[in-house]
Image (cartoon, helix red, strand yellow):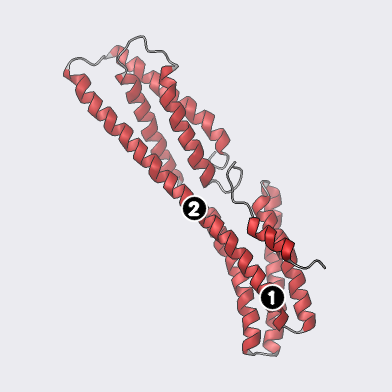
Amino acid sequence: MFNYPVLHFPLSLLVLWLSALVGTKLRNQRPLVGEEREDFGFVQAAALTLLGLIIGFSFSMATGRYEQRRNYEEAEANAIGTEYVRAGLLPASDAAQVRAQLAKYLDLRVLFYRTRDQTELQKINTDTGLLQTEMWTAVQNPALAQPTPVMALAVAGMNDVLNSRGYTQAAWWNRIPTAAWGLMIAIAILCNLLLGYGARSGQVKSAVLLILPFLVSIAFLLIADIDAPRGALIHVPPQNLVSLSHSLPKS
């Protein structure tokens, strides 16, 4: 559900709104009287404040992870571009091979960022893994045949290319934990329950009780959308990788 935030919004809105309605039913059975209402007001304000803090903290976590994914996309483009230049340190035939492989690898990395289909993603990851092995072999063989500091630069550059993909994948797996989502939703449900229970008028319209659930659901939608690397409205565009692809000489 958290991978597709658009589906998360209506479900959370419905659950939170029903929680507020349940609160009104409980109020009708056991209404607040006298000093109870004043004490209840403090509890309700504290609960809503806690919910706001948790939402803000979760939003900060999501944006931090989003920025991390953006930074690693930039790092990937820099690593591939640097190795493309360093490939010129290899013998001519090996240099041409490595550069052709890097161009193909670059196209696969762009597809990794753009695809939303899981079947296609699996194929992209498989092809990328095989190509990484071929690229490493392509720089390893001439480096072993001629182990010089100059060759070591080409090997180190290819190592950065391979590592950058691993860092990117780790960043895409780094999401807000499901347990944290569960606790945040539980607090939101209780807050809306308190909202319904603390409503003063016995004739409060259900539409009025929809306001807080709607606002909280929008906040959840924004957090989930930023936190989801794939299948969301907000995602990391491979702008640096695409720019690098356009700058490489066409074969």
How far apart, in angstroms, are the residues tagged by discs 1 and 2?
Answer: 31 Å
Determine which of the numbered discs, if any, sits on residue 85 in the image: 1
Q: In the current view of this chain or complex, which residue is farthest to the left?
A: 35
How many marks are shown on the rendered structure? Answer: 2
Label 2 amino acid? Arg
Q: Which residue is mark 2?
A: 65
Q: Tag 1: residue type?
A: Val
Q: Quadrant of residue 78?
A: bottom right
- Quarter location, residue 106: bottom right
Question: What is the x, y in percent for residue 75?
Answer: 58, 64
User: Residue 46 at what x, y percent from top left?
Assistant: 27, 33
Mark 1 crowd level (few <14, some 14–19, many ≥20, 10 Å Cα):
few
- Is 90 located above or below residue 165 in the figure? below
Q: Position of residue 80 (x, y in %)?
A: 65, 68
Give the mark nearer the N terminus: 1 vs 2: 2
Drawn side of residue 103 relative to residue 53, left or right: right
